Image (cartoon, rainbow, N blue to C red):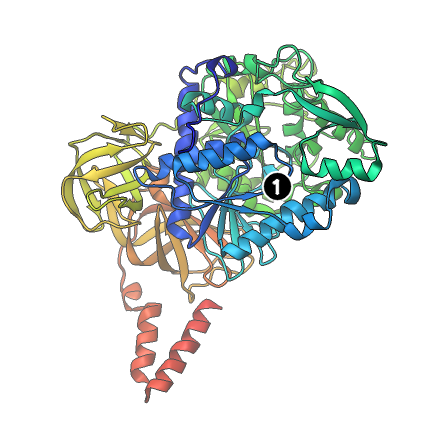
Amino acid sequence: MAATIKPFPDYRTVPAPQAPGYDHLRALEAESIHIMREVVAEFERPVMLYSIGKDSSVLLRLAQKAFHPGPIPFPLLHIDTTYKFREMIEFRDRYAAEIGARLIVHTNEEAIADGTQPFLVGTKACCGALKTKSLLDALTAGGFDAAFGGARRDEERSRAKERIFSLRDGNGQWDPKNQRPELWQLLNSKIRPGESIRVFPLSNWTEIDVWSYIHVEKIPVVPLYFAKEREVIVRGNSLIALEQSFVARLLSMHRGDPVERRHGAEDHRGAHRHQTLRAAAAHHRSRSGWIDGAEEARRLFLMSGLLRICTAGSVDDGKSTLIGRLLYDSRSVYEDQVHSVEKASRNRTAGPIDFSLFTDGLRAEREQGITIDVAYRYFATARRKFILADTPGHEQYTRNMATGASTADVAILLVDATHGVRAQSRRHAQIARLLGIQDYVIAVTEEFDKILPGAHLHPIPLSALHGDNVITKSDRTPWFDGKALLDYLESVDVDRSVTGKPFRFPVQLVLRPTHDFRGYAGQIVSGTVRPGDVVTVWPAGRSTRVKRIVTWDGDLEVAQSPMSVTLTLEDEIDISRGDLISIGDTQVGHRVRADVVWMDERPLDPARVYLLKHTTRMVTAEVDHGLLLNQIGSLTVRTARPLIFDRYTENRGTGSFILIDPSTHFTAGAGMIADAARENTSALHRPSAAEKIARLARGAASEAEAIEAIRRALEDLLT
């Protein structure tokens, strides 16, 4: 029997968390569990990439929670480069056996046999053969169409551009310029043959979130995180453990030169490495004068809550520059990042530091000096934690602005004083308002009063280039008596409470681990629920009582939004994915009136049938009139199956939907339900696509003619 793996000792962890930081971790947990359940519900063969690191350990715990009381319903895939320490491999095998997970290990044996290692072929070529090619080969061999990864958006600039559902083409490649819009929590799982999805449930987690969660959950991690003495050799500035398999080959090839043997075990832990969250070196640490490590962990739990911010405005209005300046002046970037940006800024016209480079992480963005896709950056002050969505200003990439704004609490609307308010600035403001953002930092009030009726407008004269009124009040604006930007963001009170609203619970999965357990897994969109509450299951309209609220941590006496839980009910009712369990009145119907933002270059066509995803329900839908790229319009949407919905202004979770092009699988439109649509004579007499096809089939002279007529009709609808 495998030995039990114990969590690491308490003295090596962060301080025990207190509210509201603890609530922040639970919100991240609920979001990640929701993502995992969506993948299992919508893909045929998912797999989890398991690196044995801390992020993988968190993913495993989240998977256990997501599908409790059943087992993890997908295998783990470890790409073994043969470079892992012995302790890591032992931990991998023991832990997988202990939790009952199926483990697949794949190695590029051919490359290993050819002697592929970094000192012969270079690091890039070595990683390409032992990691990238091995991974793609393993995914192909397993026929996996979705792969969970532990990447986080706070890790590097290109990672900040990744979607939660990140599409890979038939060659396993990511095209950051052609990503699908990703709005709210409505994830598009549609793929064509050969394509796959990389799934990143930890996208919105930060390093401190991961370590804090490990502490709270007492998750086992590889002991090597806390260092161990081992015999090493020195090559250049690198220490290489002698136990690595390629080292023996290296020594024999170079006969000890230029590799220098270091006699005896080398202790490279440092004097105080028991403080595990402190930065290992100066270049890992924020600039001098600011806290890191354990101090940062302590302050995390004294904050007033998470604030999500998006930028908006026309191209070249300074959105990326402002975010970069905010990160730099708040000392939220590392020294190595500063040096890299300073070096890249030498041949540019933005001064000693081009602050936009802190967020423009794609090569095409740096070359063109524009923002192409939304980038997420994470930072914290002593008063609050922030997620910044830096959105593009080009009209071509308006859909990426909508992606960033769909989850934002506050929008910063920038206007270049030399150009004034341009059409794209107005479009961004209108989209942000439609998406429900109430609070705005703006540079010009008169123009936006009409575009943003009822919103809270906070004018601040800003200069991102010179730092005026970004972190502190500027001496150059003595006439301005308001708050600086950071002070405002730290103190603004946003209302996103949904626990007092009616209970809404879209069913993601039906869990049946044993014959005597039937649970309905999902995330609570709004409201509160307790065992014994009378609930109604829609669209059937049947009522019953909640029997249990089941979680990995035990049954709960109460659950509220945004928790991801599993409900069991008193009565046996036919319930499946896409149904809604609710308390209180809701609307059910085939026709809704909605405001739609169209994000596809191919116009919205009322003669075509689209896929509509609303909560966890996917249906076919038609609209009453068309829209062009970046247009916003009020439409009547008719669905083949009923929607169970609320008005978007009352409940974002049940009032939003996305439209998907069935031929390209692109997320083409974002919809916000205004109300149920009334039936009218013209609409009643306009035949649906299904009725048109049925009429063609009935009018055919033979079965062969009917088949051909249906084929042509489907081609017309889908192309």
Name the quadrant of the N terminus.
Answer: top left
Residue that extends furthest to the right in the rendered view of this protein: 257
Residue 45 vertical position relative to residue 257 in the rendered view, above or below: below
Q: Secondary structure at mark 1?
A: loop
- Foreground residue among 473 and 681: 473
- Foreground residue among 161 and 72: 72
Q: Where, by quadrant of the figure, is residue 171 drawn?
A: bottom right
Q: Is 215 left, or right, of 685 in this rendering?
A: right
Q: Is 44 left, or right, of 640 in this rendering?
A: right
Q: Is 415 left, or right, of 208 in this rendering?
A: right
Residue 229 seen in this snapshot: yes
Question: How far across and how far down the image is residue 157, in percent?
Answer: 64, 35
The residue at the point 75 percent across, 30 percent down is 340
Q: Where, by quadrant of the figure, is residue 580 drawn?
A: top left
Q: Where, by quadrant of the figure, is residue 390 drawn?
A: top right
Q: Which residue is mark 1?
A: 392
Residue 313 seen in this snapshot: no
The residue at the point 74 percent across, 36 percent down is 248
Count of residue discs: 1
Residue 376 vertical position relative to residue 130 in the rendered view, above or below: above
Question: How far across and how far down the image is residue 612, in percent?
Answer: 39, 54
Question: How far across and how far down the image is residue 100, in percent?
Answer: 39, 39
Residue 2 vertical position relative to residue 300 in the rendered view, above or below: below
Disc 1 marks a residue whose amino acid type is: Pro
Crowdedness near tag 1: few (<14), some (14–19) or many (≥20) residues, C-alpha within 10 Å = many
- Foreground residue among 454 and 209: 209
Residue that extends furthest to the bottom in the rendered view of this protein: 701
- Foreground residue among 692 and 581: 581
Question: How far across and how far down the image is residue 667, in percent?
Answer: 49, 52
